[in-house]
Amino acid sequence: MTKLLDFIQGITRLVEANLPENLLVSEGSVLLKKLVEKDDWLPEAYAKPHADFYKQYLLYADPLDRLSVVSFVWGPGQKTPVHDHLTWGLVGCLRGREKQTTYTNNPGQSCMPTETSILLPGQVYAVSPELGDIHEVANDLPDQPSISIHVYGRNIGRVQRHVFDLATGAQKTFVSNYANETVPNLWF
Ligand code: FE
């Protein structure tokens, strides 16, 4: 757990520094890249895929609600709906391969894809209301799970945010929540 604790200490210091978002995102990406470049630390309990749904396991939430760290586990063929975050977010691929697609959302119009990127282990991607906040993430492997570590500027599982209907662009409020009942022991 030393790697996760080191990362949490580093990202908490960055958040405390009150940097402009572009600097927070670029310096946070360097820290996250270091966390995901070697897949040797995530406990099995937070790496378990589910046959029907992708899973979100909380790894850490800041007591002052300034950040959260979440393990996303996709089974073969699974993907998120098109959704927003309403805060900055960093996605670092730890295992497998993920496909990330950004979408437009204009009132009364369908959501149009604007950019697609493939994330391989060790690669990091950023979202935010400033950078483009609406996307879909999919497991790009047909026969194996993929896992990425996500970091957000709030306790993301408790935030009221939105999913979007691709065809109509209509938005619906949702709260993503977490799948786990315990969090990793960082202290001993
Ligand atoms: Fe997302």
Image: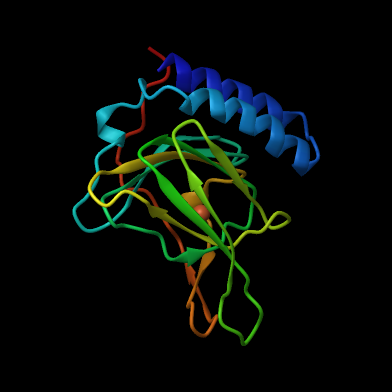
Image coordinates of residue 84 in percent, x first then y, are 56, 62
Determine whether 20 is above or below 84 in the image.
Answer: above
**56 left or right of 51 in image:** right
Q: Residue furthest left?
A: 51
Q: Quadrant of the C terminus?
A: top left
Image coordinates of residue 112 in percent, x first then y, are 58, 74
**185 left or right of 67 in image:** left
Q: Quadrant of the N terminus?
A: top left
What is the quadrant of residue 81 in the picture? bottom left
Q: Nearer the viewer, residue 4 or 99?
A: 99
Q: How many marks?
A: 0
Determine whether 89 is above or below 149 in the image.
Answer: below
**Which residue shows up at 77% across the image and 36% down it?**
23
Image coordinates of residue 145 in percent, x first then y, are 28, 44
Determine whether 87 is above or below 181 in the image.
Answer: below
**145 left or right of 148 in image:** left
Image coordinates of residue 148 in percent, x first then y, are 42, 40
What colour scheme has been applied to the protein in the rendered image? rainbow
Q: Nearer the viewer, residue 113 or 186?
A: 113
Determine whether 157 is above or below 92 in the image.
Answer: below
**52 left or right of 68 in image:** left
**Which residue shows up at 53% across the image and 17% down it?**
6
**Which residue shows up at 18% across the image and 53% down it?**
51
